[in-house]
């Protein structure tokens, strides 16, 4: 098979076909790891280019202002606290009641300057790297606007407020997708996590009542715009996975091994419907394991994910600050060496 471009490779995998080799990219690589491997690299995408990743990742830009030590208030009205990782955690949120929701005004998503980074990525990488844009689907924006604890309580106590927030998320993200589609990017990805290691954050019945139809609506809207969605959600998804797959996503990520998501089983049940991305364990193997253990874990993921195509290799979440740089490099070198099609015996 002739050598594909990175863009061709990723899109071939998203069509559930066999590319020349298994693509690789990560949603997040912490600055500590980036700097240890590529000193002086400017940002995540500069690292991706230097390391030969198959995709670059961008997103609409929303501002924030510092409101305290390590505290930043976003245009959306929630306050995040920065810690050891590059991404903060929301600690204050603007909506607690339906009255708060009715008074709330989201930022204008049609401001052209929000999409400058996307335009720059297209100019630099179109046709060479796959260009992915981060939007949300049905859970992250409600979580930001209410806070996780309050949102989970509202599922039981204020379901109409949850429905209103979920529909707001769908409407806003479809509007942003229309703006994004004009730049001719390759795919979208959403990072709305639905589960923890033991199961979904809300019951399967509540997921069906509150999230399933809106998820189908937002994914259908993305597809109508020609934007396949890579759906990221950690955790044990077994009780809700059928609904996630049925929504029409193009790819499921990251098939979380520490939560009991076996890549072989997911591939056997759903590999004819969706592509898969994952799933080298970043909680233990990439963080505490030896290089030899990482090599074996990567080869195991390749053995499970490669047959029939439709597979993108990555960590089981992200390359967070505790991942050993040498382990990340071992994973990359292993996929380069063993991730080629046709599969050898």
Image (cartoon, grey):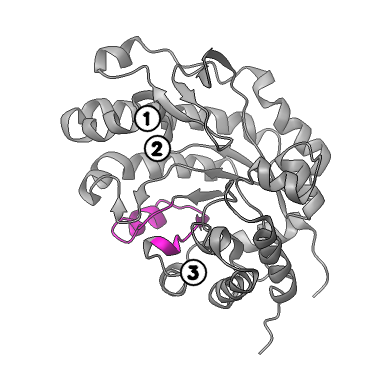
Q: Which residue is mark 2?
A: 138
Quadrant location of the C terminus in the rendered image: bottom right
C-alpha gap between disc 3 and disc 1: 30 Å
- At which x and y percent is residue 106? 46, 17
Q: Residues within 10 Å of mark 3 (few under 14, many from 20)?
A: many
Number of numbered markers: 3
Q: Secondary structure at mark 1?
A: helix
* Residue at figure coordinates x 27%, y 45% from the top left: 207
C-alpha gap between disc 1 and disc 2: 7 Å
Per the rendered image, the range of residues in magenta is 234-258
Q: Residue furthest left?
A: 157
* Residue at figure coordinates x 35%, y 49% from the top left: 195
Q: Nearer the viewer, residue 304 or 39?
A: 39
Q: Residues within 10 Å of mark 2 (few under 14, many from 20)?
A: many
Q: Which residue is mark 3?
A: 271
Left or right of residue 156, residue 269 in this image? right
Magenta stretch contains residue 78: no
Answer whether labels 1 and 2 touch (C-beta < 8 Å).
Answer: yes
Please tell me in which quadrant of the rendered image residue 178 appears: top right
The reply to whether residue 19 is in sight is no
Left or right of residue 257, residue 276 in this image? right
């Amino acid at each position: 098979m002739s050598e594909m471009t990175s863009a061709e490779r990723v899109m071939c995998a998203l069509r559930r076909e066999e590319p020349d080799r298994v693509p690789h990219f990560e949603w997040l690589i912490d600055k500590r790891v980036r700097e240890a491997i590529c000193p002086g690299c400017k940002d995540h995408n500069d690292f991706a280019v230097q390391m030969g990743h198959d995709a670059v990742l961008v997103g609409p830009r929303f501002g924030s202002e510092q409101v305290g030590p390590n505290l930043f208030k976003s245009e959306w009205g929630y306050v995040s606290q920065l810690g050891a990782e590059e991404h903060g955690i929301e600690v204050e949120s603007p909506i607690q009641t339906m009255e708060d929701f009715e008074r709330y005004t989201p930022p204008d998503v049609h401001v052209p300057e929000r999409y400058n980074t996307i335009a720059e990525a297209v100019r630099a990488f179109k046709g060479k790297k796959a260009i992915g844009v981060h939007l949300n689907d049905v859970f992250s924006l409600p979580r930001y606007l209410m806070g996780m604890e309050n949102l989970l309580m509202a599922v039981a106590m204020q379901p109409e407020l949850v429905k209103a927030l979920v529909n707001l998320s769908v409407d806003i993200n479809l509007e942003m997708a229309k703006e994004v589609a004009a730049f001719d990017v390759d795919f979208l990805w959403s990072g709305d996590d639905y589960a923890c290691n033991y199961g979904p954050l809300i019951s399967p019945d509540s997921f069906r009542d509150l999230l399933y139809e809106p998820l189908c609506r937002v994914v259908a809207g993305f597809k109508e715009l020609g934007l396949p969605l890579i759906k990221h959600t950690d955790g044990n998804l077994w009780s809700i996975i059928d609904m996630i797959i049925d929504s029409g996503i193009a790819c499921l990520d990251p098939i979380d091994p520490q939560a009991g998501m076996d890549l072989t089983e997911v591939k056997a049940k759903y590999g004819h419907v969706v592509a898969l991305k994952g799933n080298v364990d970043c909680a233990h193997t990439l963080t505490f394991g030896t290089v030899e253990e990482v090599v074996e874990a990567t080869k195991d993921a390749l053995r499970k994910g490669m047959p029939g195509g439709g597979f993108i290799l990555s960590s089981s979440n992200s390359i967070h600050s505790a991942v050993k740089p040498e382990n990340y490099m071992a994973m990359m070198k292993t996929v380069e060496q063993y991730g080629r099609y046709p599969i050898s015996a």
